[in-house]
Amino acid sequence: METKLSITEKSDFERDGFLIKRNFFNQDEIGLLYNLATDDSVTSHAFDLKDTNGNRTKLTLWFTPGDDSFGLMSRSERMVKAVEMLLGNVGEVCHFHSKVMQKEPKKGGAWEWHQDYGYWYKNGFLYPEAMISVMVALTDATIENGCLQVLKGTHKMQRFEHSFVGEQQGADPDFVAEAEKNSELVYVELKAGDTLFFHSNILHRSDANLSDNPRWSVISAYNLSFNKPFREKNMSCIEPVKMVSDSALLESGGRSVTQADFLSKEAEITLQDLNRS
């Protein structure tokens, strides 16, 4: 299992705005994480967001990475070193948040076209190039169960305006339509353990899960220490990650997320305008 990124992979990321690293986590690690993701310690803190059809996607989000198994995953040497390489070694790697995405069979909702920085801009981050998302597939992600879709190279178009689409923030549809004319649509099908690194400004979406199979993943978002937001109250995003060895995850034996600073739906900055309407 090769977890170190190559110079070629870095170049691919810079060109395309995303990079798939196959088997970044092994099946023992993924089995441990999936068991935790479906445990009440995670699911009891979930909130849902409705898409335009009223379907709901659930997520559980927390900020500070602890000594639980998910925290050890996000602080593992392979993750931190990969993020450091892709962001250019121009600042210390910090953990903004992690979230367990829960697309249930037959009813898991869609995500509209958006950029992560379309959300994070509202948190007051100034430098999108200092931010990245890393998705670890906890189950297979297929076209049938609503895998992620990306528009290749759209990270070079910079930030589009975002507004409410259902309970989500969606990118300006006129700009998305033009981007679709110029960019290749890629369905990011993943096997459990595969990992997707994607730029904060790449346009991405996903369909509802109408299959019989769940699509679960954990997404860790990272930021460089110099990129201090002026609206975000949680400061884990500018605290350098305390890196641990890659073996720490399995050695934890499956430690629950019990002391995390979970985000509530009411406290989500990007929903505040909707809450006032």
Image (spheres, rainbow, N blue to C red):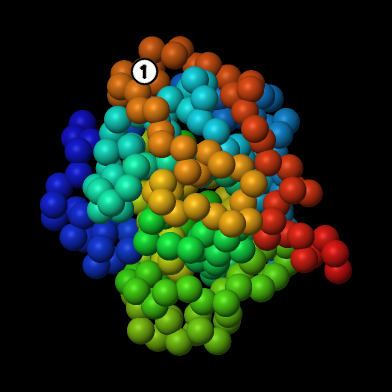
Residue on which disc 1 sits? 248
Most distant residue in the left direction: 7
The residue sitting at 51% across, 84% down in the picture is: 175
The image position of residue 252, as x and y in percent, is 44, 14
Q: Would residue 179 be visible to someone looking at this image?
A: yes
Q: Tell me where residue 4 appears, x and y as whole percent.
A: 20, 38
- Other-residue count near label 1 (Cα within 10 Å), few / some / many at <14 / 14–19 / ≥20: some
Q: Is residue 104 visible?
A: no
Location of residue 14 (image quadrant): bottom left
Q: Nearer the viewer, residue 119 or 177?
A: 119
Q: Position of residue 163 (x, y in %)?
A: 66, 73
Which residue: 79% across, 65% down? 274
Say above or below: 96 vs 77.
below
Quadrant in which the C terminus appears: bottom right
Name the quadrant containing residue 75.
top left
Q: Quadrant of the N terminus?
A: top left
Q: How many marks?
A: 1
Q: Nearer the viewer, residue 55 or 49?
A: 49
User: Mark 1 is on which residue type?
Assistant: Ala
Side (left or right) of 181 relative to 20: right
Q: Secondary structure at mark 1?
A: helix
Residue at 37% x, 42% y is 93
Specify whether 170 is left or right of 95: right
User: 270 and 12: which one is in front?
Assistant: 270
Residue at 19% over, 35% down: 2
Query: Could you say where residue 6 lies in the image, as x and y percent from the top left?
Result: 15, 47
